[in-house]
Amino acid sequence: MKKKDVYRISVVLSFIGLATMFAVETVISPESYNLGDIDESMTGEHVELEGNVENFNTAQGHLFLELNDNGDQISVVEFDSETWIDSDDLVTVQGHVDIYEGDLQIIAEEIR
């Protein structure tokens, strides 16, 4: 097989792979939950939550906040964050359920 043919096959397969990844990403999205529905059995699950920001702070580029919804509350951490928020902002968080020092938290992948 010639180098030219190998190059063409590689380019075509790369485009097919990228298109497949894009299609899968748009179809697979985290399930939405209310804050009160999150429990320890969900550790590791990819979730989407909505709530109001309370008690946020930043340290060494990380964002720490409490998300509140109808009296339910959960801690959220976003590492290497560039998110800009204010107290009482209504935000949507996508991330994974985790337990830190015995308490539930969300490791955020995206906050908007």
Image (cartoon, helix red, strand yellow):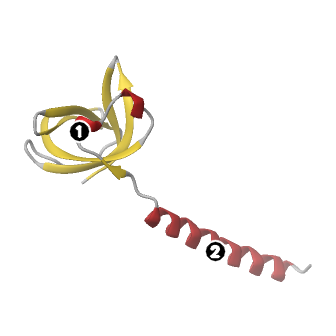
Q: Earlier in the sequence, mark 1 or mark 2?
A: 2
Q: Residue 50, relative to residue 43: is it above or below? A: below
**Left or right: 5 with respect to 62?**
right
Q: Is mark 1 on a helix, strand or loop?
A: helix
Q: In this view, does 19 lie above or below 39?
A: below
* Residue 61 quadrant: top left
The x, y position of residue 22, in whole percent, is: 50, 68
Q: Which residue lies furthest to the top in this view?
A: 101
Q: Which of marks 1 and 2 is in front?
A: 1
- Can the viewer see residue 63? no
* Residue toward you, 58 or 109: 109
Identify the residue under disc 1.
35
Q: What element carries label 2?
A: helix
Check disc 1 and give the amino acid type: Leu
Quarter that holds the C terminus: bottom left
Q: Which of 66 and 83 is in front in this view?
A: 66
Would you name the residue on which mark 2 appears?
16
